[in-house]
């Protein structure tokens, strides 16, 4: 039996379903105090901000060192066309007042999303947010831009401004309101972030895709809120890259999924694992995820293994957390990056892997039908790399696939 590939496309949110938000946790309050301290530096020369041209320096929240050190300090933003409207090449930062699940057509037409109200003062060429909302907004734009620049810089194949026709219409939603499942039956999503490629329907026909980054409110996270965690937002940006390099071409050719291998769960794991790897690349911190969720087993620097439970979950039909499979993929690739002596180079190979997976022989079962397990992932990843790197990739994967072998083909 075969099923259409997009049957298996799922939300790729980093975490799901925690309690209703308040932007009042301890970390945010601390940032607020730091922000006020920073603003004191600007009081003497404050003036209203306007449209920047080219790179601007903005006081924002970004990583400043290993071990989850974040600071509010000037950082360059390169692609804003208007800082007062918080809009530019990679999209616009907006807010939505209505739970998206109560009226999904909002996602079709973009109605209900409003420009975020931002206020800056400017001094010596540096823009400084005057309030917490502005600080969040500009930090969100910065994170999406750094994701964009990371990929475009590694390989023009992954320059989404060249690939996505309406890339600049991407909406980056601050304090997004949404329920996964029935409204009222479940709480609104919080402590989460999501990339959402929304198929726009007109008269029952899909006429295009609108892209959303949803930064959900902060509730129980007491470390770095997800929307301010650069690695997590670039994790989400990587989902967008994988969507356009792999899923969109697959859907366009009506790709099917064979059930001879655990293809859907393998692809979902791959999606999450690639996202974790590029989150690591942009921060340089393999434990970037744990800056928000210290209890999760998502540190790329900690070796993972295909336990019998995970192997059986990947081969099964439900009860599977793709982030868990992804964490293994990311840790293996962390090891490959170190072994190559160049994690960025491995990122370049992984972009080529994303772009060629659809047509990789080890991922195929007949015409337009995917059949994939982690042995196939390893083979296709190695094939997408320079010949000089293929040995390292194959040898690294071989260490992990020994335990997985029992699950292959099931
Ligand atoms: Zn994800």
Image (spheres, helix red, strand yellow):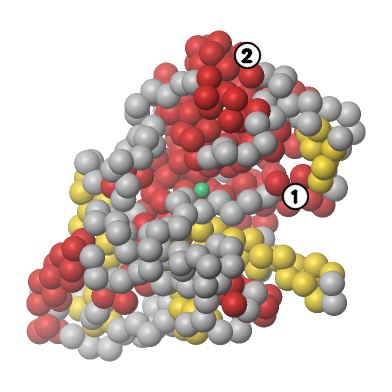
Q: Is residue 84 above or below residue 304?
A: below
Q: Nearer the viewer, mark 2 or mark 1?
A: 2
Residue 28 location, x and y as percent?
23, 66
Residue under the point 79% across and 50% down: 251
Quadrant for the C terminus, please: top right
Classify mark 1: helix, strand or loop: helix
Q: Which residue is at a point 39% across and 37% down the rendered structure image?
A: 298
- Of 316 and 218, which appears nearest the observer? 316
Q: CA distance from mark 2 to mark 1?
A: 27 Å
Q: Eyeballing the image, is 330 above or below 376? A: below
Q: Is residue 271 visible?
A: yes
Q: Secondary structure at mark 2?
A: helix
Outermost residue to the right? 367
Q: Which mark is residue 406?
A: 2
Q: Is residue 168 visible?
A: no
Out of 140 and 370, give the one closest to the viewer: 370
- Side of 375 relative to 55 (left or right): right
Q: For the residue with label 2, is its CB less than 8 Å from the closest atom of ligand 1?
A: no
- The percent position of residue 321, horizontal first and vertical second, equals 53, 40
Q: Which label sits on residue 6?
A: 1
Figure quadrant of residue 78 = bottom left
Residue 72 to residue 337: above or below = below
Give the numbered dot on residue 56: none
Label 2, residues with CA under 10 Å away: few <14, some 14-19, many ≥20: few
Query: Residue, x 62% and y 13% (percent of image)?
Result: 405
Where's the N terminus, which quadrant?
top right
The furthest residue to the front: 185
Q: How many marks?
A: 2
| Left or right: 39 in relation to 251 | left
Q: Residue 399 versus residue 340: which sits nearer the camera?
A: 399
Q: Position of residue 103 (x, y in %)?
A: 63, 79
């Amino acid at each position: 039996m075969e099923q259409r590939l997009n049957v298996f496309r799922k939300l790729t949110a980093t975490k799901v379903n925690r309690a209703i938000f308040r932007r009042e946790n301890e970390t945010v309050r601390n940032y607020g105090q730091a922000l006020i301290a920073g603003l004191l530096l600007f009081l003497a020369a404050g003036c209203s901000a306007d449209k920047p041209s080219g790179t601007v320096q903005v006081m924002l929240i970004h990583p400043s060192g290993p071990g989850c050190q974040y600071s509010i300090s000037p950082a360059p933003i390169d692609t804003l066309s208007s800082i007062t409207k918080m809009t530019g090449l990679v999209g616009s930062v907006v807010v939505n007042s209505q739970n998206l699940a109560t009226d999904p057509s909002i996602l079709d037409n973009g109605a209900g999303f409003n420009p975020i109200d931002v206020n800056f003062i400017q001094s010596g060429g540096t823009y400084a947010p005057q309030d917490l909302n502005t600080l969040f907004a500009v930090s969100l734009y910065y994170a999406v831009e750094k994701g964009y620049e990371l990929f475009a810089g590694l390989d023009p194949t992954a320059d989404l401004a060249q690939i996505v026709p309406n890339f600049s219409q991407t909406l980056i939603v601050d304090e997004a309101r949404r329920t996964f499942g029935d409204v009222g039956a479940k709480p609104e999503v919080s402590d989460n972030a999501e990339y959402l490629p929304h198929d726009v329907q007109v008269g029952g026909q899909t006429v295009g895709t609108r892209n959303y980054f949803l930064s959900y409110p902060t509730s129980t996270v007491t470390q770095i809120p997800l929307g301010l965690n650069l690695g997590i937002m670039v994790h989400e940006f990587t989902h967008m890259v994988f969507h356009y390099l792999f899923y969109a071409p697959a859907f366009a050719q009506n790709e099917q999924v064979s059930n001879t291998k655990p293809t859907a769960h393998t692809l979902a794991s791959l999606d999450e694992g690639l996202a974790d790897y590029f989150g690591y690349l942009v921060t340089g911190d393999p434990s970037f995820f744990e800056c928000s969720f210290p209890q999760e087993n998502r540190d790329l620097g900690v070796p993972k293994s295909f336990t019998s439970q995970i192997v059986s979950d990947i081969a099964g039909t439900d009860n599977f957390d793709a982030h868990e499979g992804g964490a293994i993929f990311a840790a293996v690739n962390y090891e490959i990056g170190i072994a190559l002596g160049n994690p960025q180079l491995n990122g370049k190979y992984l972009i080529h892997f994303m772009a060629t997976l659809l047509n990789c022989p080890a991922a195929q079962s007949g015409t337009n039908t995917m059949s994939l397990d982690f042995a196939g992932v390893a083979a296709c990843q190695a094939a997408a790399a320079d010949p000089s790197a293929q040995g390292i990739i194959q040898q690294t994967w071989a260490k992990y696939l020994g335990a997985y072998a029992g699950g292959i083909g099931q």
